[in-house]
Amino acid sequence: MKILVYGAGAIGGYLGGVLAASGFDVTFLVRPRVAERLDQFGINLTDLENRSTHLPPPLKRIASLDHTEETFQTVLLTVKCNDVEEAAKDMAAHLPSPECVVCFQNGIGSAEKAKAHLPNSRVLGGMVGFNVATLDEGRLHRGTEGKLIVESGESVAPLVEAWQSRGIEAGISENFEGVAWGKLMLNLNNAVNALAGIPLVEELGQRSYRRVLSAAQRELLRALKKANIIPAGLTKVPAFLIPWVLLLPDWLFKLLARQMLAIDPLARSSMWDDLERGRTTEIDYLNQAVVNLAHKHGLKAPVNQGIVDLVKQAENAEGGSPELGGEELAARLLSGRGAGVGWGGSTLGRAGGRYAAGRARRGVRGGACAPGSVRGGRARRDMCAAGLRPCPSTRTRNLHNSTPSRMIMPHHTDLSSVVAPRAPASNKREQPQSALSQLHKKEHPRHAQTQETPPHPA
């Protein structure tokens, strides 16, 4: 099978390099700067599992399609969203129609633009959930875990098998619409990071920025629900729970989201890079797509619209990132909305009131640690508000009996990472405690009690 990688940057170079190492006939269409690197070093593929594969020069590469006489069965289109239409026109003018074109872009709408100009090819969507960094001497390094998902099609099965053989978690999806929207939900942070102008780890470590991201994601989830679209779960945390995890206090978020923060300490979003280089960003395919979906179904998305406006202003100013602080960005986008203003804020406070009223109507006895309440201390309040810990009135014993209905717990939540194992039998009856409750008592020893059970590993 002859494959063309159209736009062999970091992602295209890595995906195409893996296929070339697996025996496929791969040609790279590259810019002059990348062509020089390929001619000098070839491609050195490395990843976080310490695998390494070197493809020595010369590699098959071309600078344009103007004079090529080759035919390709499959094209991996790995340019940015804003360049998809021009690339599709270029292929339509110079290539015999390839059987399959796989579009690997962030956001929503790029595949539709390609389809409009390639009516005789099967245009499929593709999603890359991991990061690839371009390092020195032709090295392309996959530095994070993540899935690679391609829309269902006969031509892509051999490619997926080749990617899997090299340690990539690759697969084929019959519901790529859900995959695309699930990835978009994660990509909404691209614009927040671009406006912040700081490394991703530093930005995600500040709750003020996460409040903005959470509000943007909740607008998307409301629009998806109205449109009857179920976003695919691309992380270990269910999609519906991610916005609420983002609202956790910094100390608790860093404890629960260690994997999310396990990224290069200097890494920033590609949108930040676009602003710094004076290029048009992909905001129309990200946050603007949320606004469009919301309007289509009679909803509003003011936070995403505000983010779009700020990014457009930065594009027009041509001065790079505006470097907005977290509190300033939250004040601009969340002021007067009560969106994620805190555990005692209007949104969660109203939820807590509804919860307590529901308990009263059902005649449920016992205290209620509802969202927005102040009962039970800092760790207990935060966990109850996120739906990650049982209500104090139920005690942890409900994890081991047949009455889970009195738990404040989102469906499909994995309890094993939150709740400690049952303590060994002793003369004194003890209640198992969550790992986070134990951490809280370590930080506040005046609340701590002596216990024989070793702490549950975080």
Image: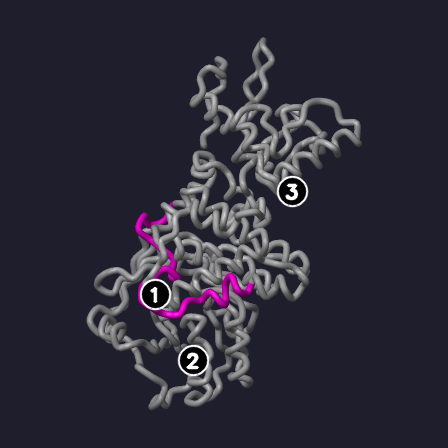
Q: Along the line of sight, which residue is nearer the eye, 171 or 353?
A: 353
Q: Residue 388 in the image: state x and y as whole percent.
A: 58, 35
Question: Measured from the top left, where is residue 179 in percent x and y?
Answer: 55, 61
Q: Where residue 246 sits in the image (x, y, percent)?
A: 50, 44
Residue at screen point 54% across, 82% down: 116
Question: Which of the labelled discs sits on residue 417, or is there none?
Answer: none
Q: Is residue 195 above or below residue 296?
A: above
Q: Residue furthest top?
A: 427
Label 3: which residue? 411
Q: Is residue 362 left or right of residue 22?
A: right
Residue placed at 59% from the left, 19% from the top? 431
Whether 268 is among the magenta residues is: yes
Residue on which the image places disc 2: 87
Q: Residues within 10 Å of mark 2 (few under 14, many from 20)?
A: some
Quadrant including the C terminus:
top left
Q: Give the residue at the far front of this rendering.
A: 336
**Three-letter amino acid code of the residue under disc 3:** His
> Over which residues does the magenta segment extend?
262-289
Q: Identify the element where label 3 is drawn.
A: loop
Q: Mark 1 or mark 2: which is in front?
A: 2
- Distance, label 3 to label 2, CA atoms, is 44 Å
Total labels: the figure holds 3
**Residue, disc 1:** 10
Dot 1 crowding, Cα within 10 Å, few <14, some 14–19, many 20+: many
Using the numbered discs, state the Cα–Cα distance from disc 1 to disc 3 in whole angstroms. 38 Å
- Looking at the image, residue 205 sits to the left or right of residue 242; the answer is left
Question: What residue is drawn where x is 26% and y is 77%?
Answer: 32
The answer to whether one can see residue 6 in this image is yes
Q: Nearer the viewer, residue 10 or 214?
A: 214
Q: Nearer the viewer, residue 387 or 316?
A: 316
Instruction: Residue 115 in the image: state x and y as whole percent.
Output: 54, 79
